[in-house]
Each structure stands twice: as structure tokens, then as C-alpha cells.
Image (cartoon, rainbow, N blue to C red):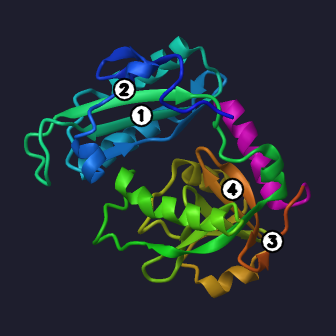
Amino acid sequence: MAKSFDNREGWIWMDGSFIPWKKATTHVVNQGLHYASSVFEGERAYNGIIFKSREHTDRLFKSAEIMGIEIPYSKAEINEAKNALLKKMNYLNCYVRPIIWRGSKQMGISTSNADIHVAIAVWDDWASYFKIEKRLEGLKLITSPWKRPSPETAPCNAKASGLYEICTMSKEYAEKKGYDDALMLDYRNYVAEGTGANIFFIKRKDIHTPIADCFLNGITRQTVIEMVKKQGLNLVEKHILPNEIENYDEALLTGTAAEITPIKSIDDINYSTGKNTTSYKLMNDFTDLVNFLI
């Protein structure tokens, strides 16, 4: 069983310094905790190099801008800190988590005098959400009762902590019913994504994915879109209704931790999985791409 995340050895980069892991704490009365006033990133290192590190940092800063948070460091300083922490922890393959939050200087809804804190942590015991056996078998999904909200009601282009509460509730809903993950629809009843990953559907050489207009346009999602276009496959971004997903042969999730993970079923709809599928080929192609880029 993995160690609790508050009881580990190592270091965390916090507010410009390396802090022993167990001492990297914050007061319980802070805006980030009470009002979800925080943004973060999920990144992955392969063989000691963070995949698309600059793109993740760009998105982190964009998220902060949307949330009205002024980061007290430059992008170059954050990138340097990530790499330095990776070396200090002596990790080659791991998950990388930068997070920015409003602190304890001010409480309440107003943020005019809030103090800003930045931390980066890395860990190597869940670089991937799903074990390779589960990824080869494919995931079982159930449709969540919770939906992605309208862009007029939530900052959908920010990787903001508060937006993940419905993901947590959807994941819990799925697991309690014996499923691996949940399919989330959006406020218009279109297919949106998984709880922490984007979704694609495959019909022969056609690959369809929902338009990212009310959920995060994932960096892995963007990578996969570029990859399949270069392979000559027909990539279409479109609104997909729930009653259309039974028309596809395959389905898969994409994300930093999920990478490319095939879907075995959604509710009572079954999809093809295994070594003779396009999904399996895309899994291997993504691995080759990552190894080539680093």
C-alpha cells in the first residue's frame, strides 16, 4: 500500500525553496482550502525529462490569469524549479504537480489582499492512473449524473481545483457501482469527457472527439490530435450525443496520467479492445512519440 502523501521522505519546492516533504505545510485557514482558490497542473516525466513542460507551465499561468492570480515567479523560474526538483528527488519517471493557491493573509470572498503561494511536488507511485493490465483490458465506464457546467458559470479553460469536485463525485459514483471511471456529459447533454481525461471514439479510420468548449482542452488530447492527423486518419471534433456513442467500434481516454487508455464499455455499450485495435496502436504510437521527443 502506498504511503500517505503527508508522510513521505524527500523534498517539495515551495515559495522559492526546497522544503523537507513532511514540513511542506500550510495553515488550515486559507482561501485556497476554504474557497478552492487554487490552480494546478498535472505533468509527467519520462526518463528524467518532463513531457511538454513548457506547454504545461503556459497553461498554469493562463489558469492563474483567468482566476485573477498573479504568480510571483516567471515561467522560466517555474520550469527551472520543476527540473531541479526532479533531479533532487532522483526520479526518472514520475508525476509532477505544480500548484498555486491563495493563502491565509485574507479570508472571505474578496481576494484584493490575498497572499499567493506556489509549490511543486513529484511522486513516482502513480505516474499512470491505471495498471498496464487494466489498460490492455480496457476500462468500464458509467454515465455520471453530474454534468460539465456552462462556460458562463465556471472558468472551464482554467485547470482550477474547484472544477474537479464534480469529477471526484462522478469517480466515486462510478467506483461504488463497480466501474473504473465515469463518462461526463455537459450542460447541453453532449458527451464531454471522463472524470480526469478527454475522450475519443473510433469508427474504422474516423476518429471523433467532443469539441472542448466547456471542458479543459488537455495537452495529451492536443498531442493525440496532432499525432492521428499526421498518420492520415480522419480526425473530427464535433458535438456527440449520448445515443450516438453506440455507433463507434472503439473508445479511449487521453490524459497526462491516463496517457492513452482504451475503453471496454460505457454503460451497456461494448467496444473492441486488444492488440488488433486502433486504440492499441495509438497506445504504442504515443509511447514511441514520448520516447522520441525526450
Specify the amino acid type for callout 3: Tyr
What residue range appears in magenta? 275-293
CB within 8 Å, label 3 to label 2: no
- Mark 4 or mark 3: whose residue is earlier in sequence: 4
Q: How far is the residue under mark 3 from the one under mark 2?
A: 41 Å
Tell me the amino acid under the disc marked 2.
Answer: Ile
Q: Please give the residue where the numbered disc 2 appears in the rendered image.
A: 78
Q: Single out the mark in the foreground, 2 or 4.
A: 2
Instruction: Tell me the residue that label 1 is attached to.
Output: 98
- Mark 4 in CB contact with mark 3 (< 8 angstroms): no
Name the residue at 44% across, 41% down. 41
Amino acid type of disc 4? Val
Marks 1 and 4, Cα distance to the nearest angstrom?
29 Å
**Number of marks present in the image shown:** 4
Q: Earlier in the sequence, mark 1 or mark 3?
A: 1
Label 3 residue SS = loop
Mark 2–mark 1 Cα distance, whole angstroms, equals 9 Å
The residue at 13%/35% (across/down) is: 105
Q: Residue furthest left?
A: 112
Residue at label 4?
228
Residue underneath mark 3: 271
For the residues bearing labels 2 and 4, Cβ distance under 8 angstroms? no
Amino acid type, label 1:
Pro
From the viewer's perspective, is the residue at label 4 or at label 3 nearer? 3
